[in-house]
Image (cartoon, rainbow, N blue to C red):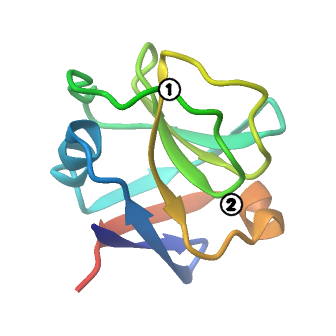
Amino acid sequence: MNIRLTIDGQPVGATLNDNAVSRDFASLLPLSLDLEDFHQTERIAYLPRKLDISGAPTPATPQAGDLTYYAPWGNLALFYRDGDSASDDLIVLGHVDDRDTERLAKAKHITIEAAS
């Protein structure tokens, strides 16, 4: 599924993976979220509700540009640096088409909506 992110006013295309957790995330769209830095690796925001993680895909090490969901906290994470390792609690939902890591690292606000 194609989605559109607007990061600090600039549109960016993105693609959600085809799995049950990504579809549950898509059911929340559109979203408008404030982002904060986490461990100088990712920008995070809390979703309005936790996602259903039954049928979650196999854990993968996040890469710069990945849009992920951290199940224990119920937060969305947009990685601007590669992660260290895979975690059973971190689910890769999709990825940003333009992996401008400099812009991702400075992002303060994001809107996410289905692409038309």
Q: Residue beneath label 1, please?
A: 59
- Give residue 11's position: percent from left, percent from top: 52, 83
Q: Residue beneath label 2, please?
A: 107
Front tag of 1 and 2:
1
Front residue of 34/58: it is 58
Q: Residue at x 25, y 44 (%)?
A: 19
> Tag 1: residue type?
Pro
- Quarter-of-image position of residue 112: bottom left
In the image, residue 80 above or below residue 36:
below
Task: Please tell me how crowded label 2 is: few (under 14), some (14-19), or many (20+) other residues with Cα within 10 Å.
Answer: many
Q: Residue furthest left?
A: 27
Q: What SS does tag 1 mark? A: loop
- Give residue 49's position: percent from left, percent from top: 25, 30
> Tag 2: residue type?
Ala
Task: Please tell me how crowded label 1 is: few (under 14), some (14-19), or many (20+) other residues with Cα within 10 Å.
Answer: some
Q: What SS does tag 2 mark? A: loop
